[in-house]
Amino acid sequence: MKTNLFNLKWGVLGIVVSLMSCVSDDLAEVGDNVDLTGPTPFYNLADISTSEFDCNDVELSANYEINFQAGSNLAVNGTQYQWSVEPAEGITLIHKDLPILKQLIEAELATVVALEEEIAKIEFRIPCEDDLDRVEVLEAEVAALEAQLALAEAAVSDETRQNVKNLEDQIAALPPATLQDRELIISFPGPGDYNVGLVVTDNLGKSETTERTVTVNQAVPTIAVPEIAEPSFEDNSLFDGTGDGRDSWRAPNNDDWSPFGAGTTVIQINSTSIEGRLPDGFQAAKFPSDGARVAYQEIDVTPGAEYVLTYFSEFDDSSFGDITVSILNPDTANYTESLLDENIVASRTDSNVGRVSDVFKQHAITFEAGENESVIIYVTNTGVESRLDSFAISVKQ
């Protein structure tokens, strides 16, 4: 019996050794499988185009630039990249680090750059202004900013100047961008469709290609943010440093715009000396409980654009009352017409139900300009004394 067990043990051991020898790397044609997986290329892109238009929306310049970054499923050494662009006429290749180095220079000269940008913004507006008084104010602002700019430039330290020079030297030393770079910026000659291909080759010599159509869109003017004058009803907040907080909100005609057909319609003002009690500043618009006062202001808008108007309201809570903020077509001529659906672009009514006296709450109205080049902000109230503050408007993206 012992002899049989001994023979069985060695028999099993022999089978195991035999099986192990079958997977030995020392045997010809036997061993690990060769990795036949090739690269799967892809690329990401980011549009970094810039453009400039004058106040009549005439294009002054446009740089149609897109940042391309290649990738693949393999993280192997020696991977090579080859870009192709069709049509290729007129394209320019830009080193990926150039915008970064330029931003670092701007960061070193942050105060100087901020003043230069503010001056440029105002100088852009001046030719667009028809109001000579406003032009005079803008020119005075430019002169004051230029004086600040001269001081800021003189205050730049030697260390900062050296840092800027070092960055400029890095820009000068950048190698030319090539179609073999993993990441590069391509400047296109103009809008249109371009076929951008990418070939990725791994360190074993295997290659794969991906290609897609990249659409470069025509530059369009930035939609201007409308200006609301005296938005928080503060004294001296007009462009020239004047105003009593109400001047920009007066209806063109008391009789036409009064809810009662006659009488004074100009809003009243509530003020406080305690900072932070109001959403903004120290004054708010007051609408007495009789509903006789209205707010009216026409603002410029861009046809086809969509906007968000925000503001804050507050109510006396002694009895029921509400306040309505409407966006009206510019040809609306009086209070009666302001109630007609065809003249109301958008409207919002808020009541004092559930509200707490002396606590302001923010609201928003979204509206489309349609074919209008201007709209009217019009406010009425009923029931109880109501207040509004801190109007603001933004372009909805």
Image (cartoon, rainbow, N blue to C red):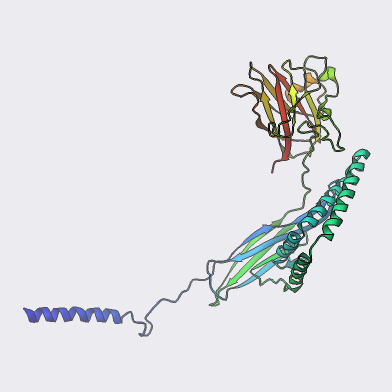
Which residue of the protein is positioned furthest toward the left in this rendering? 1
In the image, is 80 to the left or to the right of 324? left
In the image, is 46 to the left or to the right of 263? left
How many marks the image carries: the answer is 0
Q: Nearer the viewer, residue 353 or 50?
A: 353
Residue at 72% across, 24% down: 341
Q: Which of the 4 image quarters holds residue 44?
A: bottom right
Give residue 362's position: percent from left, percent from top.
66, 32
Q: Nearer the viewer, residue 247 or 206?
A: 247
Up-down relation of residue 45 to residue 285 (above or below): below
Residue at 74% across, 17% down: 291
Q: Nearer the viewer, residue 136 or 281?
A: 281
Residue at 64% across, 28% down: 359
Which residue of the protein is positioned furthest toward the front in this rendering? 273
Quarter of the figure that contains the N terminus: bottom left
Give residue 237's position: percent from left, percent from top.
82, 35
Q: Which of the 4 image quarters holds residue 175?
A: bottom right
Up-down relation of residue 123 to residue 270 (above or below): below
Give residue 225's position: percent from left, percent from top.
77, 41
Quarter of the figure that contains the C terminus: top right
Give residue 282's position: percent from left, percent from top.
74, 31
Q: Nearer the viewer, residue 212 or 161?
A: 161
